[in-house]
């Protein structure tokens, strides 16, 4: 009888442990799935390099790119923005998107080029399709605050 009780308790514990692990996996944030802040920082570095090389849009970043201090702040803000948007612990402290891009004359095609560069950076690091789509889904609504020319 004692052996049956121990076996039953052990089976219950294993079932509970498996259920808890499955629940934890389901609740993992996009931030965790992306690999955390270090992975986001790597993607941002690649993304910024792609934008700097992209003749379609790099003129929008000329002043920032030419000043190392501004570039470091830009990258840091971008990391924090993606970190926060993906459910991470970071807090974005930069300007809101409308204020940051006001008067720049950004068109929908420019925003699309930016997204292409981001997707390229995510693809370089082999970000899972579901995570890539989830991230683009949380960042995409910013388009209405950034694009001035339809």
Image (cartoon, helix red, strand yellow):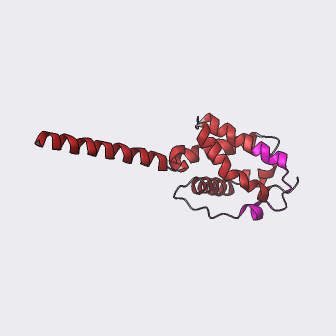
In this view, the residue in front, 51 or 122, is 122
Q: Residue at x 57, y 54 (%)?
A: 83
15 vs 78, left or right, is left
Residue 89 to residue 34: above or below: below
Q: Residue at x 73, y 44 (%)?
A: 115
19 vs 137, left or right, is left
In this view, the residue in front, 93 or 9, is 9
Across and down, in percent, residue 125 comes to 59, 36
Residue 102 to residue 131: above or below: below
Across and down, in percent, residue 41 comes to 57, 47
Q: Residue at x 54, y 59 (%)?
A: 90
How many numbered marks are there? 0
In this view, the residue in front, 129 or 93, is 129
Across and down, in percent, residue 54 comes to 77, 40
| Segment tinted magenta in the rendering | 92-114
Asked if the magenta segment contains residue 100, the reply would be yes
Looking at the image, can residue 35 be seen? no
Figure quadrant of residue 118? top right
**Dividing the image into 4 quarters, which one contains the N terminus?**
top left
Can you name the residue that lies furthest to the right here? 150
Q: Residue at x 70, y 64 (%)?
A: 95
22 vs 92, left or right, is left
Residue 73 to residue 39: above or below: below
Across and down, in percent, residue 11 comes to 26, 41
């Amino acid at each position: 009888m004692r052996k049956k009780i121990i076996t039953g308790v052990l089976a219950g514990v294993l079932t509970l442990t498996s259920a808890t692990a499955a629940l934890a996996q389901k609740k993992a944030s996009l931030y965790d799935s992306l690999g955390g802040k270090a992975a986001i920082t790597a993607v941002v570095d690649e993304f910024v390099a792609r934008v700097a090389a992209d003749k379609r849009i790099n003129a929008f970043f000329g002043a920032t790119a030419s000043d190392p201090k501004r570039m470091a702040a830009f990258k840091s803000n971008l990391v924090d923005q993606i970190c926060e948007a993906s459910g991470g612990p970071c807090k974005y402290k930069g300007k809101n998107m409308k204020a940051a891009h006001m008067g720049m004359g950004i068109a929908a095609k420019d925003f699309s080029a930016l997204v292409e560069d981001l997707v390229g950076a995510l693809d370089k690091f082999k970000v899972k399709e579901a995570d890539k789509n989830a991230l683009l889904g949380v960042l995409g609504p910013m388009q209405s605050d950034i694009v001035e020319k339809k």
